[in-house]
Image (cartoon, helix red, strand yellow):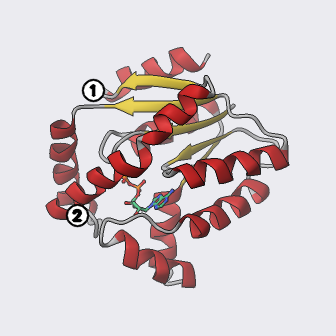
């Protein structure tokens, strides 16, 4: 099973991705988590990424594609995987398609979690109080939302045209949402 999960910041992608990857026994690859760990280890990638993330901006496509290209060859040879937070722009999606073609892989589904924007901002502000993430102050959150609608939302159309888009209502109990996802991918 090869999947990706997308949706606006705060919609619960990370939460669902963790549960799904465990229950489907596939690898969970979160670009946000990978970048935060690079920042924590103060690597070259981490230093570059931090300057973008802290301002609520996207990290440059070429950096992200380099990271993914390495991960997808080392960790995911013939296994299933779930990408969380990637791709986030059209150039990332076309770069990803090329990587998949090169490796003879096929995506089974692109899960699109949806929710009302006010609900999302409220959730992230609440989460920011405990997550300790440097990008969860209110002005930065609003900027991330804006960037999502400008740069990431076009991917909904992109995967719709490939006939693998699965829209899922992201409002409800965590278990309920997992159930909705599992129903459409089988
Ligand atoms: P969220 O889904 O709540 O925005 P993530 O952990 O997925 O959280 O991402 C946090 C930040 O990391 C993003 O705002 C962005 O700066 C950076 N980032 C993560 N994934 C990507 C990506 N695929 N392309 C560019 N930047 C990314």
Where ligand 1 lies, by image quadrant? bottom left
Pick whichever, 50 or 127, lies toward us: 50
* Viewport quadrant of the C terminus: top right
From where the camera sits, is residue 87 visible? no
Q: How packed is label 1: few (under 14 Cα within 10 Å), some, or many (20 or more)? A: some
**Residue for point 36% across, 66% down:** 57
Q: In the shown orientation, is residue 47 left or right of residue 97? A: left
Where is residue 91? Give x, y as percent.
58, 54
First in sequence: mark 2 or mark 1? 2
Residues at badges 2 and 1 in contact (C-beta under 8 Å)? Answer: no
As helix, strand or loop, the secondary structure at mark 1 comes to loop
**Residue 61: mark in rendering:** none
Q: Is mark 1 within 8 Å of ligand 1?
A: no
Pick whichever, 121 or 146, lies toward us: 146
**Residue for point 37% across, 69% down:** 53
**Residue 171: mark in rendering:** 1
**Residue for point 53% across, 16% down:** 184
The answer to whether residue 138 is above or below residue 37 is: above
Where is residue 83? Give x, y as percent.
57, 45
Where is residue 128? Give x, y as percent.
21, 58
Instruction: Provide the residue designation for mark 2.
Output: 140
């Amino acid at each position: 099973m090869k999947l990706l999960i997308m949706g606006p910041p705060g919609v619960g992608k990370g939460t669902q991705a963790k549960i799904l990857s465990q229950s489907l026994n596939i690898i969970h690859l979160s670009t946000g988590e990978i970048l935060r760990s690079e920042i924590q280890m103060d690597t070259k990638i981490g230093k570059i990424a931090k300057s973008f993330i802290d301002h609520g901006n996207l990290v440059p496509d070429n950096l992200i594609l380099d990271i993914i290209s390495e991960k997808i060859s080392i960790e995911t040879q013939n296994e299933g995987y779930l990408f969380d937070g990637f791709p986030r722009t059209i150039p990332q999606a076309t770069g990803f398609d090329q990587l998949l073609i090169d490796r003879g892989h096929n995506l089974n589904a692109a899960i699109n979690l949806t929710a009302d924007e006010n609900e999302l901002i409220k959730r992230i502000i609440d989460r920011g109080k405990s997550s300790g993430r440097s990008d969860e102050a209110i002005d930065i959150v609003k900027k991330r939302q804006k960037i999502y609608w400008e740069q990431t939302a076009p991917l909904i159309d992109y995967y719709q045209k490939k006939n693998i888009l699965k829209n899922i209502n992201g409002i409800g109990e965590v278990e309920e949402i997992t159930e909705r996802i599992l129903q459409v991918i089988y």
